[in-house]
Amino acid sequence: MPQLSPDLAEEFAGQEEAVTRLIRENARFEALARRSHDLWLQIHEIERGNSTDDDALRGLKTERLGVLDEMALILRGGKNAPSQARKEGRF
């Protein structure tokens, strides 16, 4: 992911430089960024009317929120972001 995707630029407005740096330097953060973008694409595909599966849409949105929460924890300097997010009940 060489360039920050528009969905992540929107989610992390004002932090684009830090997000881009983490994508380059942190393998976990890069994987999360890719997953978030993939989920965003799937969500928009469903919302464009190409599917009527409300449960699938809800599941994708929930998963993406968990991914974004973990990314935010890493961005704030959380060393144990996944376990911290679970501990806080975020996913």
Image (cartoon, grey):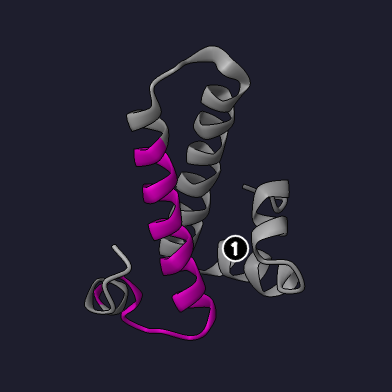
Q: Is residue 31 above or below residue 15?
A: above
Q: Residue at point 54% right, 77% down? A: 75
Q: Closest to the observer: 82 or 59?
A: 59
The range drawn in magenta is 58-83
Q: Is residue 73 above or below residue 59?
A: below
Picture coordinates of residue 17, whole percent (x, y):
74, 71
Q: Is residue 24 magenta?
A: no
For disc 1, the marked residue is 24
Picture coordinates of residue 30, whole percent (x, y):
50, 57
Picture coordinates of residue 27, whole percent (x, y):
44, 61
Quadrant of the snapshot with the C terminus:
bottom left
Q: Is residue 80 magenta?
A: yes
Q: Residue at point 57% right, 62% down? A: 23
Q: Closest to the observer: 78 or 47?
A: 47
Give, as a three-letter code, the residue at label 1: Arg
Examine the image and state in which quarter residue 10 appears: bottom right
Q: Is residue 79 above or below residue 7?
A: below
